[in-house]
Amino acid sequence: MWFGVISLFPEVLGVLNSGVTGRAKQNQLLQINCWNPRDFATDKHRSVDDKPYGGGPGMLMMAEPLHAAICDAKKAAPENTSVIYLSPQGKRFDQEIASQFAAKGSLILVAGRYEGIDERIIQQDIDEEISIGDYILTGGELAAMVIIDTISRLIPGTVGDHHSVSLDSLTSGLLKYPQYTRPEHFLDDKVPEILLSGHHQQIEHWRLKQSLGKTWLKRPDLLAKKQLSQEEISALNEFIEEFLQKNSRKMP
């Protein structure tokens, strides 16, 4: 996967040199290139921001150096690479979009700063706006790293056991089932017997039931969007019945 990042603070992306993304870079599965608009400024002060026309607080990233940086990145990028502006006004980033981006093979991510960027850049250079959530960051670099990290997990060879990626929360549209490791007893709590049974078919059914149940309890919005199979409906009804029975016993 090839990434180009347009950023005034490319050093922030150094975090990606660690962990899974760091190994992916070393193994040439992931390529991250940075362009700093300040390198394309034309005045002696290397200016990249200015006051907005019409007044108002703060500063905006100027069109000229930002446009030049994007154009230079597009020259270096693989053919038909999309340019994504990281903006609170964009479409909400999720696992489905991550999969779509991973399939593209390359992206240019534009990290804004200050109060945003000149609207003409959005109109002329940006293919899509993406937001990682309904909150405001000081800059788009953190959003860029979130997107790169999420997509990198989908690249075959990046994660040691790629099968585990298919079992991650949200990959199937559901939250992941509860997981346990040693010791078997901890703080007066015990690992569920089914996981110690060795009956793989029963374990898979339990995990499906728990995954559906967790989603029903914590993220019903995800469940509402998912078309459940008959097996999944049956497993969810089983979980709900057990949950209601268990909690009715706790009531005074």
Image (cartoon, rainbow, N blue to C red):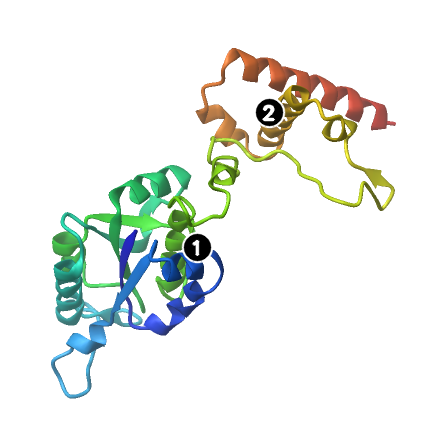
Q: Residue at x 60, y 13 (%)?
A: 234
Q: Residue at x 49, y 37 (%)?
A: 163
Residue 3 is drawn in which quadrant?
Answer: bottom left
Q: Amino acid at mark 2?
A: Leu
Which numbered marker is on residue 135?
Answer: 1
Q: Is residue 59 visible?
A: yes
Q: Quadrant of the C terminus?
A: top right
Q: Residue at x 21, y 69 (%)?
A: 52
Residue 124 location (% of width, % of height): 12, 54
Q: Residue at x 29, y 72 (%)?
A: 8
Residue 191 vertical placement versus 1 (above, below): above
Identify which residue, 165 or 28, lies in the foreground.
28
Label count reads: 2
133 to the left or right of 230 = left
Residue 132 location (% of width, % of height): 40, 50
Q: Residues within 10 Å of mark 1 (few under 14, many from 20)?
A: few
127 to the left or right of 100 = left
Q: Amino acid at mark 1?
A: Tyr
Residue 19 location (% of width, % of height): 49, 60
Residue assigned mark 2: 208
Residue 249 is drawn in which quadrant?
Answer: top right
In primary-sequence order, the first of circles 1 and 2 is 1
Q: Nearer the viewer, mark 1 or mark 2?
A: 2
Identify which residue, 74 or 92, lies in the foreground.
74
Element on which disc 2 rests? helix
Residue 1 location (% of width, % of height): 30, 51
Residue 23 vertical placement versus 167 (above, below): below
Circles 1 and 2 in contact, beta carbons < 8 Å: no
Q: Residue furthest bottom?
A: 44
Which numbered marker is on residue 167?
Answer: none
